[in-house]
Amino acid sequence: MRKIVQTLLLLALVALLPSCEMLAQLEKNAGPLAQGVKPLLPKVTYQDATLVQAPSQHMMAAYFCPQVVPDPFGVPGVARLACSQAFGPQPSPQQMAVAFDLRFMVDNPNHFPIPVAEMLTAATVFPANTNTALGAACVVFCGANQPGCTGHPGPNSCKASSHDIRSVQDFQNAAVNFLVSSGIHALAGQKPSFLMPQVVSDGHIQFTARFAFGPDALLTTLREVAKQAIGQLKAGQPVQFEIPYRLQGTVWFDVGSLGRVAVGFGPADGKWVIPTASLMP
């Protein structure tokens, strides 16, 4: 009877060995947290803004020529006819879309991955002019278990409690639908989406966010540039269309016990030059 009891006890100890090893590993992994090490803030570095879609200079001239060149002797339709002969038919507003990519580098100093939760981007075009146009877009990124998620923000999205961080309240004067987000991607050639990206533990990730200007507000602003080039348009000469811009915003992360934290970027100024040929069909 004693041998049977000893045998059963030995079998029970053998069965517990994997559990002991698992507990030891869990204790090892939880060591830094048990010692009072707190999660660290990620670092966001804004890299550049690249124009990825724009009408050609010829399309710009064809679109704006009938709008800014007056009819000779006040005869209606003469300017439009002359413009169509010089530049061809007037493009549609949809053909005049302008889109750009923002590239960021995110460094994660923590021993666990962190998701990018939300992103606020504000774009000002012609910031030095009196006809400055401002747009802002808030994006909420979706988890893998949220099929059909569109990234549309809720009432509490892109808001920050700190006055040092730009939030959606800071851009209440932004034109509605002036700036539209297409999502973000982490690999070259990847289609932008609203799927929540993960920044790997003790590592970094480069991601690109794509935005587009709504045609109405941007075309109203560009019309002012076209008015300055009436002489070139009348002569059928190519016009150098440029879009000065200022970009700024905030990226929100879910950082462990720190909860939802915000890291700002910008303001960054630059200038996009509308190319001779379209960047994208």
Image (tube, rainbow, N blue to C red):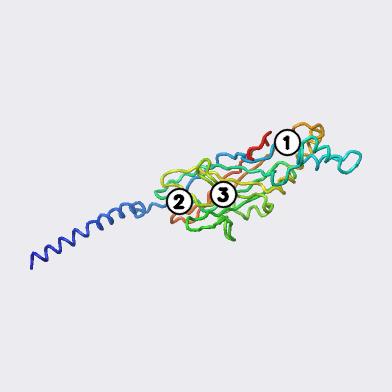
- Asked if the residue under mark 3 is in contact with the one under mark 2, i.e. CB atoms within 8 Å, the reply is no
Q: Element at badge 2?
A: strand
Residue hosting label 1? 58
Amino acid tagged 3: Gly
Q: Which mark is residue 208?
A: none
- Judged by depth in the image, the label closer to the viewer, 1 or 2, is 1
Q: Element at badge 1?
A: helix
- Asked if the residue under mark 3 is in contact with the one under mark 1, i.e. CB atoms within 8 Å, the reply is no
Name which of mark 2 and mark 3 comes first in the sequence: 2
Amino acid tagged 1: His
Camera-side residue: 176 or 131? Answer: 176
- Judged by depth in the image, the label closer to the viewer, 2 or 3, is 3
Q: Which mark is residue 114?
A: 2
Name which of mark 1 and mark 3 comes first in the sequence: 1
Residue hosting label 3? 183
Q: What distance separates the C-alpha of mark 1 from that of mark 2?
A: 46 Å
Q: What distance separates the C-alpha of mark 2 from that of mark 3?
A: 18 Å
The C terminus: image quadrant: top right
